[in-house]
Image (cartoon, coloured by chain):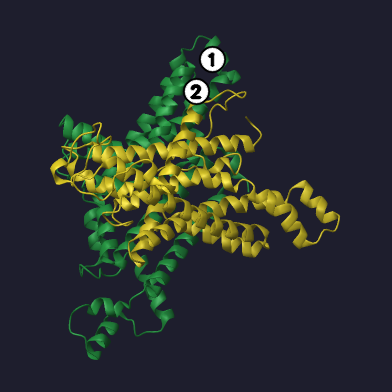
Amino acid sequence: MSIALPEQATSPVAALAPHPDPAPSRGRRFAPGLAAAGVVLLLVAVATVAPRLLTGTDPLAADPFHALEGPSGAHWFGTDQLGRDVFTRVVHGARYSLSIGVISTLLSVLSGGILGLVAGLSPRAVDEVLSRALDVLSAFPEVLLALLFIAFTEPGTPSLIMAIALAFAPRYGRIVRAQTLLVRRSGYVEQAVTFGLSRTRLVWRHILPNVLGPLPILATIGLGSAIVNASALSFLGMGPQPPSPEWGAMLSESRNYLRVAWWAAILPGATLTITVISLTAVGRRLQRRFEGRR
Amino acid sequence: MLKPILRRLGSGAVVLWAAASAAYLALRLAPGDTVDTLVGDGPDTPQIRAQIARDLGLDRPAVVQYVDYLWRLLHGDFGRSYVLQRPVVDIIGSQVWPTVKLTLLATAFSAVIAVGLAIVTAGRARWLRGLVSGIELSIVSAPGFLIGILLLSVFSFQLGWFPVSGDRDASALVLPAVALALPIGGLLSQVIREGLERALDEPFAVTARARGLTRSALLWRHALRHALLPAVTLAGTLIGFLLSAAVIVERVFGRPGLGEVATEAVNNKDIPVVLAVVMLAAAIYVVLSTLADLAYLLIDPRLRKG
């Protein structure tokens, strides 16, 4: 799992970044790290949409005679306890991790965003109630809140998605609320009010665009956390059930064979980590762009 | 000074009350009737059902039940486990110590890692800082269970220095605590390093150096205080992370503790136990982050107004 900072960061966009940026890169230098991150994300995207392009093997094809073999030319990531090709399973697993991450992030941005917007635009009493509700939700550690949700439903992909969405919604809600208040009190909105603009027009033309602008970037950075937390819950057995090649579930299946076959657990985990780092790197770059720092 | 403290305490109490109420609502709205769950596969007659409802007080008005629920929560009564048929408090009480040990040791480790790394690298050569912050970023981004599995693989299976699982002696605690401490230490050290570098640029730092103070004395005695302030703000987030991550790390290392209690209970649909663990975590979060906020008021007088 990854940690995200609370709203104490300077800008609403910075609030979701895993750490404050110590040294913004100067000038338009070619950044090899960023390019690598782009390539990784491209590969993950291809694996999600068309896994057959990257591997011709069946992710579920077991071959007991070649179980727990180390990485080799034939099996790049080795084979697992049933002789399934780990690389193929990692490629096919991208679909689970990414779709769970993307859908749950969209849901939490949407629900949190609407809550935050309503809170920010409402009279003080309503705002107070909604903010307190968000405070209450935020008091529950994310993984535990998701676990609680799953306890009430059946373990599986849909409830995992809902659980992650619920766990992350307060975060976006608070950021959007803070941003809405900021925009609402800004000079240009005050001016617009002075000129007698109708409330509807004010909200749609002036407040919404400025509040929603940073959201896609926030979502990119938040996507990494969503993916990590989803795979953590899968690791606990709350997500896609075996033999689905979800990354977290693969790690959990292979944990018992760690003594003889480190690759079957470590390589899926490493893929997950590299994907998340790439998302964070690209998200931060976008964020810097957005804030006018290059 | 008193007003902001009272206000902070009050809002903490409100959050706890609302969390308890939400938990109560969840319990009532849970799919599957409580009586159904308790009857299970046993004999099912209207008499038995009525008996169970009476025993649990389910035949009383909802408001009375709610007040009773809050009253019992205040006295530490979280109800009975559906599955184990024991008071939830006993189940949690017997498993809380391993988790407390783990999180306390992890907190100590992460403080050492964070301060150590930050002091060693602050204001040093660009490549060194780049390298260290790259490693920190990877650790912070990596899933907790992967760090745990890597540590297990290297130090338990390859080198055989630490036991693979369980909680028999102190050595079994080291790897889980390190797995938990690494991401927190990585994040904190970034914040502290930034604070140290900012402090080193201040005029007072230059003056101190000009008067002949050594670099390390300056760092430890003067700059570190300034650098620790922003770290205190992070306390709330880090506590939430610590509690979440502990559940997962415990499972990776096959340790007893609240993580095992929670995951077992989720799998068995033992709602009272899950609720109790989650409420406990929320309570710990609220209490500790309130304390952190109060500490901040003590440290930084500028915040005392308003």
Identity, as a three-letter code, of the amino acid under mark 1: Ala
| Residue B266 place in picture, x, y as percent | 29, 62
| Residue B36 place in picture, x, y as percent | 28, 79
Dividing the picture into quadrants, the one containing residue B242 is: top left
Q: Is residue A123 above or below residue A89?
A: below
**Chain colored green:** B
B208 left or right of B64?
right
Are marks 1 and 2 in one subunit? yes
The disc numbered 1 marks a residue on which chain? Answer: B
- Residue B89 seen in this snapshot: yes
A141 left or right of A130?
left
Q: Is residue A159 above or below residue A99?
A: below
User: What residue lies at 18% left-to-right and 35% top-to-bottom?
Assistant: B156
1 and 2 marks in contact (CB < 8 Å): yes
- Quickly name the residue at label 2: B222
Crowd band around label 1 with a 10 angstrom C-alpha radius: few (<14), some (14–19), many (20+)? some
Please tell me which of labels 1 and 2 falls first in the chain.
Answer: 1
Identity, as a three-letter code, of the amino acid under mark 2: His
User: What residue lies at 73% left-to-right and 50% top-to-bottom?
Assistant: A185
- Quickly name the residue at label 1: B208
A259 left or right of B81?
left
Q: How many marks?
A: 2
Q: Is residue B217 above or below residue A116?
A: above
Viewer-side residue, B252 vs B176 = B252
- Residue B220 seen in this snapshot: no
The disc numbered 2 marks a residue on which chain? Answer: B
| Residue A199 place in picture, x, y as percent | 77, 61
Viewer-side residue, A97 vs B225 = A97
**Chain colored yellow:** A
Q: Is residue A290 above or below residue A111?
A: above
User: What residue lies at 30% left-to-right and 40% top-to-bottom?
Assistant: A87
| Residue B108 place in picture, x, y as percent | 33, 36
